[in-house]
Image (cartoon, helix red, strand yellow):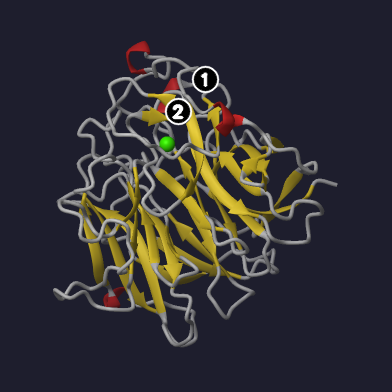
Amino acid sequence: MNLALLAASLAIPHTIGGMAEDSSLQQAGPQRGPKADAREYAQGPAVPSIRLERLLPALPLVRPIQTLQRPGDPKNLYIVEQPGRILIADPSDAATKEAKVFLDIREPVNDQGNEEGLLSVAFHPQWPEKRELYCYYTAAKPRRSVLSRFTVAADGMTADPASEEIILVQSQPYPNHNGGTVLFGPDGYLYLSYGDGGAANDPHHYAQNLGSLLGKIVRIDVNKKGSNGAPYAIPADNPFVGKEGAKPEIWAYGTRNVWRMSFDRTTGQLWAGDVGQNIWEEIDLIEKGGNYGWNAREGFHDFTGGKGEPPFVEPVVEYHHREGVSVTGGVVYRGAAIPNLEGVYVYADFQYGTVWGIRMIDGKPTKPTVLLKKPNELISSIDEMADRSMIFSTFNGGQERGNAGSIWRAVAAQ
Ligand SMILES: [Ca+2]
């Protein structure tokens, strides 16, 4: 393992915290977690292998970190580049060398740090009544993360950088752990994942502090203004509305750095991959008001030096740093094109390029199955398209700033 590369990993588990096996930072013991039942696996049908089919091989991309589609356009792909551009390309045209630029906000976006940049975008689901794009990015001077709304042209082919309306600004104490995924839930509200603010070990204990948005999943209503003139409203049934000292935007807390999360379009469940610190990467199902344990817990284990009040919501599954270093949460596959994969939650390790799948059966996961190993690619995102196919975004040749990347469609292995 190249430690320099390791330290530079996208959702840096070790940036400032030091080497992976720094014993002062390890959890108290792998068997201390009380939830033996939480690691009982369900029996389920075999999960098939997949392979990745390269899309748009002639199109140069810089650190693609998300692929999505606009409601009403099932053909084009909108490819998000971390430095701050969104490109449009038709994947059926394999010879495409040049994409249309949908939005270029490289100017306000700061992508100096490995985990900084344009991190996630979402279209308002009510297209074309709402021609809105929501962008979550980091900015500098002062260091902060920004959620903004942009207006999309009626033909859906451009968004106007000058239309930016800032919705939510969060100061960021360190360059790493900015989260984050922005997306709309089936309830029509906007969800956003914030990392714990960075450094290592959550030194200021933000994730357990309900007075901060850091280390949280938030839920806001962007269809209304707030009572105090804020550009968004708080859903009345958010779990901490009216709680003294708590931010009413919070939906769930105690997360370290949820880089990717998604809603299962069939069950409506919110799945998240929460990047671990030193040893354990975890997959969570995010519930209203849930405390996901960081920094008292890492995966199913106590984390030395952390603090927090139980009860904690345990992960669905975890994996050890022998198997990867930074989880990329994925999606529940709801397509039919890959036989026997329907209903499987597919997730990956960013750096090792291993892709796993689990099913949930009667509230328990099946044992994670390896679907694919792609060790030469850094898997930054797994996204669901309108036809329910899965697109993988990857970096090629390492993770230095400005490096190239690719997008791929998951297909059956045979
Ligand atoms: Ca946790």
Front one among 81 and 39? 39
Residue 393 seen in this snapshot? no
Mark 2 → mark 1, Cα distance in angstroms: 8 Å
Which amino acid is tagged 2?
Answer: Leu
Is 382 located above or below residue 131 in the figure? above
Give the residue at the far right of this rendering: 414
Q: Residues within 10 Å of mark 1 (few under 14, many from 20)?
A: few
> In the image, what residue occupies the spot 27% across and 56% down?
240
**What x and y, as percent, mark residue 109?**
29, 57
Is 188 located above or below residue 42 in the figure? below
In this rendering, position of residue 238 left or right of residue 341: left
The disc label shown at residue 5, or none: 2
**What x and y, as percent, mark residue 224?**
29, 78
Rendered image quadrant of residue 297: top left
In this rendering, position of residue 125 left or right of residue 47: left
In this rendering, position of residue 224 left or right of residue 93: left
Secondary structure of residue under mark 2? helix
Rendered image quadrant of residue 265: bottom right
The disc label shown at residue 1, or none: 1
Q: Quadrant of ligand 1?
A: top left
Secondary structure of residue under mark 1? loop
Is 33 located above or below residue 136 in the figure? above
Q: Do the residues labelled 2 and 1 touch (CB within 8 Å)?
A: yes
Residue 253 seen in this snapshot? yes
Front one among 187 and 337? 187
> In the image, what residue occupies the spot 51% across and 28% down?
35
> In the image, what residue occupies the spot 82% across and 54% down?
339
In this rendering, position of residue 173 left or right of residue 275: left
Q: How many circles with numbers are drawn on the protein?
A: 2
**What x and y, as percent, mark residue 212?**
21, 48
Is 291 located above or below residue 80 in the figure? above
